[in-house]
Amino acid sequence: MEHHFGMDKVNIYFLNNKKQPLIISPRWDPSLSFLCSFLRENRTWIDETILRHGAVLIRGFEVKDGATFERAIMSYQPSLNCTYRGTSPRNKIKGTTSIFSAAEVPVNFPIAQHLEMSFLSAPPRQLYFGCLKESQTAGGETALCNFKQIIHDLPDDLCQKLLEKKLKYTRRQRRVGNKSSHDVSDQNGWSEIFKTTNKEDIKQMCKEEGEEVYWDEEENFISTWLSEPFQLHPVTNEPVWFNHIQVFHWTTFPAELFHAFLRTWDLRFLMRALYLGFLCIFKYALLQQQMSLNITYGDGTPISFWEMSIIRNAIYKNMVYSRWKEGDILLLDNFSTSHGRQPTYDKGRKVVVCWSNPLKKSNALKNCVDAKSSIFQGREALHSTAIHSKSIDDPVIAESHYEQDTLTDTDFTSLIGSIDSDTLKERDFARLNLSSSKALSTNEKQPFITDPSFWKMD
Ligand SMILES: [Fe+2]
């Protein structure tokens, strides 16, 4: 059996039946030094686990501030990247070299689900969040969503339309941002985004990104580029929803606030949703103004209110909302698992972020119907094999079917019952234990599988 450092000293479990995120917490040693050793020694295993579950949450260790967060992260990923061309205003955290505040926008602003910098040519491969202060009131979660699932929850015709027309981003930034704007992407000016006022330097940076840029007579920076709506995951080859439509459509802020109201029943979200709803209809629908980072179909035609509604519902369906606890560290596969901020009215909430390994997008999905049908047929075939021929006598395969939702809970339970336990290896017990305890795994305190061989991917 392959040796993994310190696995007997941690609990590993899930908070929800979407199995996202996977949680790692200390059994008896919460020290930062143990955490750093654990992360350093188990780097490959953690990589595989992030890949498999999309998100890993490390909870209960002595991570008190930006410096200890950075120390923990760098023991896992020594080369962090500091280049940020995204849209949220961010400040470097004191006493660190690569840690930033997650978003310097008022905490009652929702930030819709997105893969970090997905609209750039090389988004970070992984993203790391740290919670230095949790929200004490409703909201404030950094919700997650499995963007590999979105293709299955969108209608074929909308997917195909997006693939055929592609997406056009138009970025229009003032020289200095407007910090009181309701548009998050308008809060940073171009001189703040590029950290320089030298236009030649900026042109060179944008050329490397494949973007043509110019400045209009009012000194506004303008850049336009086409992008694909889906990318194939660089490791698993699954189609991933890979764009920022849901963040920069003009309906975003009122829609996200209304969604937050429906979750929390906090009337302040409803009032703000109504206010911004009227404002956005007036500005963007009637006056035809544009968001600072505007997205249309590639031919310039708008993405309609109803199309946005379908897209948003597909995302909401797949979201998980784990509440932060102080000292939490969240590790994300930024090529499969999105994040976004639920609004809150607790101004004390403090979440920091860093990222690594920019990876060139080069694997766009071309045909949605083919992709969907091949995945569907693959699942159907698995299901047919599993149920009708009753040919599954290997718990590892059974677990794999269950993981892919080709077996129902009942079928899986009956298959487990048909397997002679004497023939199972220790590792297979662990696999079965994980799957059959799906219903139990909502109990956060439940000690869970610590057999490292289970987590090794095949
Ligand atoms: Fe983000």
Image (cartoon, rainbow, N blue to C red):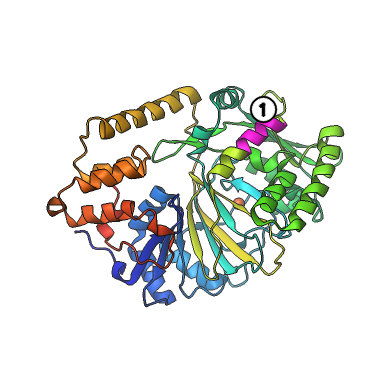
Residues in magenta, as a range: 305-312
**Going 42% across and 76% down the picture, which residue do you hit?**
30
Which residue in the protein does label 1 denote? 297
Front position in the image: 32 or 203:
32
Direction from residue 223 to residue 33 in the image, left or right = left
Q: In the rendered view, would you say 413 is above or below 388?
A: below
Counting from the top left corner in percent of width and height, residue 14 is at 42, 58
Q: In the rendered view, would you say 284 is above or below 162?
A: below
In which image quadrant can residue 247 be found? top right
In which image quadrant can residue 426 be found? bottom left
Direction from residue 332 to residue 2 in the image, left or right = left
Name the amino acid, label 1: Tyr
**Going 56% across and 64% down the picture, which residue do you hit?**
324
Please identify the quadrant where the N terminus is shown: bottom left
**Ligand 1 lies under 8 Å from the Cβ of mark 1:** no
| Residue 310 within the magenta-colored segment of the rendering | yes
Front position in the image: 166 or 120:
166
